[in-house]
Amino acid sequence: MGNKIIALNNETRALKQQSTPSKSASSQGKVWLVGSGPGDAELLTVKALRIIQQADLILYDALVSDEIRALFPEQTAALFVGKSKNHHSISQSALNELLVTKAAEGFNICRLKGGDPFIFGRGGEEALTLRKIGVDVEIVPGITAASGCTSYAGIPLTHRGMAQACTFITAHGETGLNLDWHALARPAQTLVIYMGLSKLPDIRRELSYHGMPTNTPAALISNGCRPEQQTVIGTLETLPELAKQHQLPSPTLVVIGEVVTLAPALNWFNTLIESEQHELSA
Ligand code: SAH
């Protein structure tokens, strides 16, 4: 176990002594893998909020918003275990080890993730590791970015007459961008791409090469469901330039398909900063 984990251990032990664990220290603790949704604290489920309030220890990711972190009880140890530019992070194996050790010590742990733990959130890996060695695990689903961000941008993912299917894609998988581009380029569907911000030129190249018209409507939604949300609308062709021009930060979600054309009419959260309407109707 590395120094960082030892530091975390000392910190949590000190804090645990001040708090009242819901189980005696001798019994095995439990891990709740909890989805925090995309940002707005009111999008937490009632169950997620209860687990946050009752846990002995909260381990949270970079995607957990400030608004949600503000709900952590003051007396509860809360540790950042995510990956982000400004913070140190721990490896997935070190994190798994931390979860196992703390559960064995009797901590009831809220492992809080952005969105939904089972959608591009590595929740499956953590749950498998824990169950393999007999740690009790419960999964609390959350609103995934695809659903939350598009709702707040006014983009109905499967609007009748426009999309009969919706596909969630990661641009950062173990296989890289080794996707079935031919199937993804077909009409009458919506593509939602997670972790795609740095891959926009590749996404444009592959989709257009496999037959998607370059004037297909497309949107970029950054910081979805948060006060700083920005929604930019263009086309498959203009996606990389729009991201650059507006310096869109992480996290940003990419949405491609005709449903994007509804955003100017349904943009109830007022986050539309650019919409290339002339191109969409061309
Ligand atoms: N488990 C998460 C996804 C983790 S992958 C979920 O279900 O939402 C991380 C990617 O999700 C980011 O790179 C971004 O593409 C997307 N994402 C997550 N939260 C977001 C938000 N609030 N706004 C925009 N994109 C978001």
Image (tube, rainbow, N blue to C red):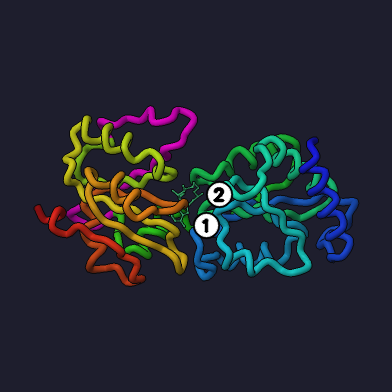
Q: Give how far across and how far down residue 173 sits, in percent.
A: 47, 34
89 or 50, nearer to the observer: 89
Q: Quadrant for residue 272, please give it.
A: bottom left
Residue in the picture at 72% in, 47% down: 136
* Kind of residue at disc 2: Pro
Among the two numbered marks 2 and 1 on one chain, the one whose residue lies closer to the N terminus:
2
- The residue identified by callout 2 is 117
Residue in the picture at 85% in, 50% down: 10
**Mark 1 sits near ligand 1, with its Cβ under 8 Å away:** yes
Q: Is residue 180 left or right of residue 139?
A: left
Residue 215 is at least partly visible in this image: yes
Q: Which residues are magenta?
A: 158-183
Residue 73's place in the image compared with 169, above or below, is below
**Mark 2 sits near ligand 1, with its Cβ under 8 Å away:** yes
Q: Is residue 211 left or right of residue 222?
A: left
Q: Give how far across and how far down residue 258 sits, in percent.
A: 21, 52
Judged by its main secondary structure, the magenta piece is loop
Q: Give how far across and how far down residue 187 sits, in percent.
A: 19, 42
Q: Which mark is residue 282?
A: none
Residue in the picture at 84% in, 65% down: 19
Residue 208's place in the image compared with 8, above or below, is above
Q: Quadrant for residue 47, please give it.
A: bottom right
Task: Name the element at disc 2.
Answer: loop
Query: CB of mark 2 within 8 Å of CB of mark 1?
Result: yes
Q: Give how far across and how far down residue 222 sits, in percent.
A: 41, 56
- The residue identified by callout 1 is 142
Residue in the picture at 25% in, 30% down: 182
User: How dense is the environment of label 1, judged by Cα within 10 Å: few (below 14), some, or many (20 and up)?
Assistant: many
* Kind of residue at disc 1: Gly
Distance between the Cα atoms at labels 2 and 1? 7 Å
